């Protein structure tokens, strides 16, 4: 029987959680059909120490998430993100396997690549799904309006393209034997016209907002660009990333890459500390995957206070430095 195929995004030898979540949805759709995965890699990167072993180990490890065959596609142009090239390779693998569905995470890259796969092959794309069942028609549940609405949809297609809403479904583990194969893509020059040519590390960088285990965010209540010094300090002490609301990016206090929300990054940290943020639905759409939310707000009636696990009512300019001071004092005693 024809298999399904899923695109796996990865960095530093580790598959992204969003791709592993995607495999859970792909496996449930496959209902016994084989699950194939596509892992993209560059021989340039593979020359790096640990490079090749890391990519093969990653591909092999996908068995724990139900992948039967992992295809590693190597091409030197895959050293950086090239959406048309990724789409071409995913389309070629889906054709070769005669795949019954193609899956990717609903990340910025995943959605962009899948839109291109759809445009190239004239196939329908359903984005931000949390469940998909095979059948005629296929039935899907999609997140709409930043996750505040669930849409039940039907799709007629012999090869649906599906992206899975980030951090909306759990990762599922299993024990499948994985075969690792190499796949040689055919790329045309024009498919490499759009590609990332430089990475600029974010200021204060290190921990990526999307993958951070702790995120400390500031909103309008922080008051100014300079006011973020205390937010940065707390994030640094907790080994976390700094986030913010859209009011903050609109005011130019922080770059758009720091924005959490419907039109920003969707995050799922262990702890989200929201300082001076009211909790508008468009903001909550980005942080509701957080395991715990601590809200610090001078208004006890602010909507975020109802959506948080812990709430501190007061001035963030006093509370945030007090938390940092306490952490330092505790570490001092411990050390
Ligand atoms: C289409 C669309 C998309 C959007 N996308 C996003 C998005 O991706 N992300 C996003 O964040 N927003 C988004 N928004 C904007 C969103 O609707 C809100 O306007 C925004 O989130 C509010 O930001 P805020 O909470 O920082 O500001 P406010 O709503 O003004 O809240 C400020 C909070 O700070 C508190 N405060 C003030 N001073 C202090 C102090 N000293 N100490 C403690 N607390 C204090 C106040 O009590 C208040 O609760 C979007 C809007 C639209 C229409």
Image (spheres, rainbow, N blue to C red):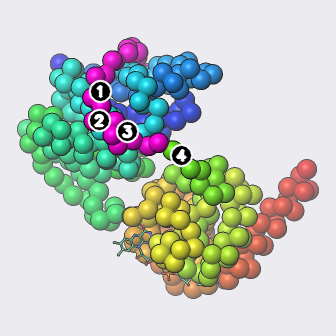
Note whether ligand 1 is within 8 Å of mark 4. no
Residue hosting label 3: 82
The residue range painted magenta reads 171-197
Q: CA distance from mark 2 to mark 4?
A: 20 Å
Vertical side of 31 occupied by 47: above or below: above
Number of other residues with Cα within 10 Å of mark 1, as a class: few under 14, some 14 to 19, many 20 or more: some
Position in image of residue 304 (x %, y %): 50, 74
* Along the viewing direction, whichever of 169 and 216 lies nearer the viewer: 216
SS assignment at label 1: loop
Q: Is residue 111 visible?
A: yes
Q: Does 330 sit left or right of 310 as displayed?
A: right
Q: Quadrant of residue 81?
A: top left
Residue hosting label 4: 199
**Is the Cβ of the residue at disc 2 closer than 8 Å to that at disc 3?**
yes
Number of other residues with Cα within 10 Å of mark 2, as a class: few under 14, some 14 to 19, many 20 or more: some
Q: CA distance from mark 4 to mark 3?
A: 13 Å
Vertical side of 228 occupied by 330: above or below: above
Residue hosting label 2: 191
Q: Quadrant of residue 51?
A: top right
Note whether ligand 1 is within 8 Å of mark 3. no
Residue hosting label 1: 187
């Amino acid at each position: 029987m024809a298999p399904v195929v899923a695109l796996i995004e990865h960095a530093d030898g580790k598959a992204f959680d969003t791709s592993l979540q995607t495999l859970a949805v792909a496996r449930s759709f496959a209902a016994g059909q084989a699950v194939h995965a596509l892992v993209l890699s560059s021989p340039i990167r593979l020359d790096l120490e640990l490079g090749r072993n890391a990519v093969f180990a990653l591909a092999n490890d996908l068995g724990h998430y139900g992948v039967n065959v992992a295809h590693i596609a190597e091409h030197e142009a895959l050293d950086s993100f090239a959406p048309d090239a990724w789409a071409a390779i995913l389309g070629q693998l889906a054709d070769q396997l005669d795949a019954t569905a193609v899956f990717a995470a609903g990340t910025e890259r995943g959605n962009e690549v899948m839109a291109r796969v759809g445009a190239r092959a004239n196939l329908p794309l359903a984005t931000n799904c949390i469940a998909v069942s095979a059948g005629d028609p296929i039935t899907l549940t999609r997140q709409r309006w930043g996750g505040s609405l669930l849409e039940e949809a039907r799709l007629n297609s012999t090869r649906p393209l599906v992206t899975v809403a980030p951090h909306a479904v759990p990762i599922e583990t299993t024990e499948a034997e994985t075969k690792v194969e190499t796949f040689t893509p055919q790329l045309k020059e024009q498919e490499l016209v759009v590609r990332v040519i430089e990475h600029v590390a974010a200021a204060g960088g290190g921990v990526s907002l999307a993958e951070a285990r702790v995120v400390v965010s500031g909103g309008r209540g922080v008051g100014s660009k300079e006011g973020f010094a205390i937010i940065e300090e707390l994030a640094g002490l907790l080994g976390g990333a700094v986030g913010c609301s859209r009011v903050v990016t609109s005011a130019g206090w922080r770059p758009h890459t720091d924005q959490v929300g419907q039109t920003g990054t969707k995050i799922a940290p262990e702890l989200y500390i929201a300082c001076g943020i009211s909790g508008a639905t468009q903001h909550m759409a980005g942080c509701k995957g957080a395991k715990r939310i601590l809200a610090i707000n001078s208004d006890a009636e602010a909507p975020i206070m109802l959506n948080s696990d812990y709430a501190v009512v007061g001035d963030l300019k006093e509370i945030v430095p007090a938390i940092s001071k306490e952490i330092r004092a505790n570490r001092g005693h411990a050390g």
